[in-house]
Image (spheres, grey):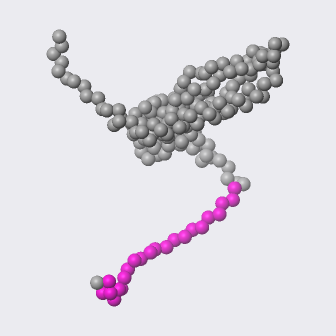
Amino acid sequence: MSDNKVIPLEKPAEFCSDPLTELLRKGARQLITDAVEAELNVLLDQHADSKDSNGHRQVVRNGYLPEREIQTGIGPVTVKVPKIRDKSGQGVKFNSALLPPYLRKTKSIEEVLPWLYLKGISTGDFHEALQALLGSDAKGLSASTISRLKQVWEKEHESWSRRDLKLKRYVYIWADGVYFNIRSETDRQCIL
């Protein structure tokens, strides 16, 4: 028999999740699914005429790739990408333009990372900051990932700072001024 008298208390489900965020994630998941299915149907229609001697299509649906999570501005969204089977040997493959094979985070997440870095979030604190922004399920953005991204940003900045400006023309306006909000003695007496 154990002498442990500690009883773990769990938070009720209603306090752990935000119903509006869950609704948004469910809607995003459905929207992504519909868009990817439409992409697949376009590909299948392009190869509808490719048939074998028995009249069966040579390019057909063939289940789904393993489910994966995409980090979005509303937290992680699980997606399933359909697969095709090319029986003709032409090498037809389906790669969604919306969900490329190695996409793990949306563009909005990629854009917020440099902004957080410039605002002073240290590499080691990114995970905690992103959990606060994206929810506790934020994954895939470790300190080593941020360090690699930082190297990319530094290279981009270096190439940007060395770009050729000879053929560029910029118009600018320089304005300088001082605004005083001083009231006279009579103005102050009227206010009182």
Name the main secondary structure of what is drawn in magenta. loop
Q: Specify whether 6 is left or right of 24.
A: left
Residue located 61% across and 21% down the image? 64
Q: How many marks?
A: 0
Q: Specify whether 43 is left or right of 67.
A: right
Examine the rendered structure and indicate whether residue 56 appears above or below residue 185.
above
Quadrant for the N terminus, please: top left
Q: Specify whether 74 is left or right of 174.
A: left
Residue located 35% across and 36% down the image? 14
Q: Nearer the viewer, residue 98 or 29?
A: 29
Q: Horizontal and vertical percent for residue 163?
A: 65, 47
Q: Nearer the viewer, residue 80 or 27?
A: 27
Q: Can residue 111 be seen in this view?
A: yes
Write the start and end of the magenta stretch as one range. 168-191
Examine the rendered structure and indicate whether residue 53 appears above or below residue 110.
above
Q: Horizontal and vertical percent for residue 6?
A: 19, 23
Q: Specify whether 1 is left or right of 41.
A: left
| The furthest residue to the top | 1
Q: Which of 9 and 119 is in front in this view?
A: 9
Residue located 25% across and 28% down the image? 9
Q: Is residue 134 visible?
A: no
